[in-house]
Amino acid sequence: MSRIPKIFRQARPSFRSSSRYGTELPKRVAPDPSRINLASKYFVSDIAGAVVPATRLGNILDTLEQGRKLPEQALKYLQKQGLSALHLFAQGEITYEEFHGLSAGDLFMREHEAAAQRQKEEASRLQRIEQGKAQEAIRKSKYERDRQRAEEAQRKRENDPKYIAKMKNQQLRMRYGLDQFIEEEFFPRLMSILRRLDGGNRLSDEDSLWLTTEGKDYYTEVLKTAFHEREAEFYATEYKRSSDPWNAVNASGHYRKCNQAKKAHDLLISIPAGSQKAPKLKSAICTTHGGVMRDLNRLDEALKFGEQAHTLTSKDFRPCTLLGALNIEMGNYGTGKDWYDKAEELGASKHSIDYDLRGIFIRADKAKRDEMRVFLLREDPVRYKWVHNFKV
């Protein structure tokens, strides 16, 4: 092998700190000019590992430059990398001049192929970009067509009388809290009821009865409130027209059931004293007014109305149930129970009394509820076992 001129001299690498032919370092390490010159001398300047120190190829070049023989592992590496001319030169099978002639052509081909590959990759990248743009344009065009078709379909639906009627029915049901499934056989009647109430009209007796029987599943709180509002308005109007106190009593009862106790109070105090001579009528006025005072949390006044009503009609259970409820709410449990017992003797049903007690129990705060639970269970643990269902 002919003598090769040295490009530069460098210290013998330390093999203690790193493997001569180990894993290549990251390629971001900036090469120095001497490494570039060395790589160019051996026609491998196009290979990244040739210009970075401590890489496999960089260590091989250092060894060759120092005139030392390459180990078998390094020779195999050159073969694997396709550096056949450098492999022959490293084994001493060709001279540097011969190596120069072979490697210069190899370098040119590698650089040409690399440039062609870069051009191909760039063309592919640009093609992907163009394809992406075309696909995005197609997607946007499709989206716009779909949007326009959807808007057109929506406009047609909104102008369709059937669709308009369907939406109105849906909105009407929502206003009255009817978001559940409605049986087909009940739908026409229920919608007729809703339309009447929504139009400010009263229901017929048949429809009122239907809501509390077959249609009870659809008798929502909102619907009940609307029903009682219409009834209250009707009887209040009738009272103004006829001055019949019974209409004021009926209107007040309905005002109470739609949470408008103040209107009921104003109506009842408007009844002239001269119109309240009949004991039954005056008792009804007092009982109703007592209930109104109870709703307004004016319990002492409510008690006076209840006692006055009972004095007027001692055989009527209604004042007794009012007095029973008031005393229970005021914590007078024994007195309240006595009034309820009297009401039952006069014709009040156990069911209606227990319904009253449940309502009082549910509305009470925790302390009063605990007191009421103890009292009721002591009175009749079987009849009032429902108190166990309310723990809080």
Image (cartoon, rainbow, N blue to C red):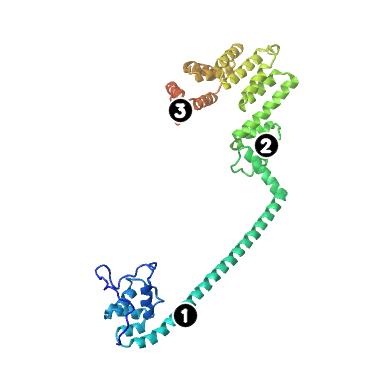
Residue under pointer 1: 112
- Can the viewer see residue 383 in this picture? no
Residue 64 percent across, percent down from the top left: 30, 79
Q: Residue furthest right?
A: 241
The numbered dot on residue 193 is: 2
Task: Please identify the quadrant where the C terminus is shown.
Answer: top left
Quadrant of the rendered structure where residue 74 is? bottom left
Residue 237 percent across, percent down from the top left: 72, 24
Asked if labels 3 and 2 touch by Cβ distance under 8 angstroms, the answer is no
Q: Distance between the residues labelled 2 and 3?
A: 36 Å
Query: Dot 1, how many residues are within 10 Å of its Cα: few (below 14), some (14-19), or many (20+)?
Result: few
In the rendered structure, the answer to whether residue 257 lies left or right of residue 195 reads left
Element marked by disc 2: helix
Task: Single out the mark in the foreground, 1 or 3.
Answer: 1
Residue 214 percent across, percent down from the top left: 61, 36
Quadrant of the rendered structure where residue 127 is? bottom right
Element marked by disc 1: helix
Question: Given the image, on which type of amino acid does mark 1 rest?
Answer: His
Q: How far apart are marks 1 and 3 (CA)?
A: 94 Å
In the rendered structure, the answer to whether residue 369 lies left or right of residue 300 reads left
Asked if labels 3 and 1 touch by Cβ distance under 8 angstroms, the answer is no
Task: Please identify the quadrant where the N terminus is shown.
Answer: bottom left
First-in-chain label (1 vs 3): 1
> Residue at (35%, 79%) from the top-left corner?
80
Element marked by disc 3: helix
First-in-chain label (1 vs 2): 1
The numbered dot on residue 387 is: 3
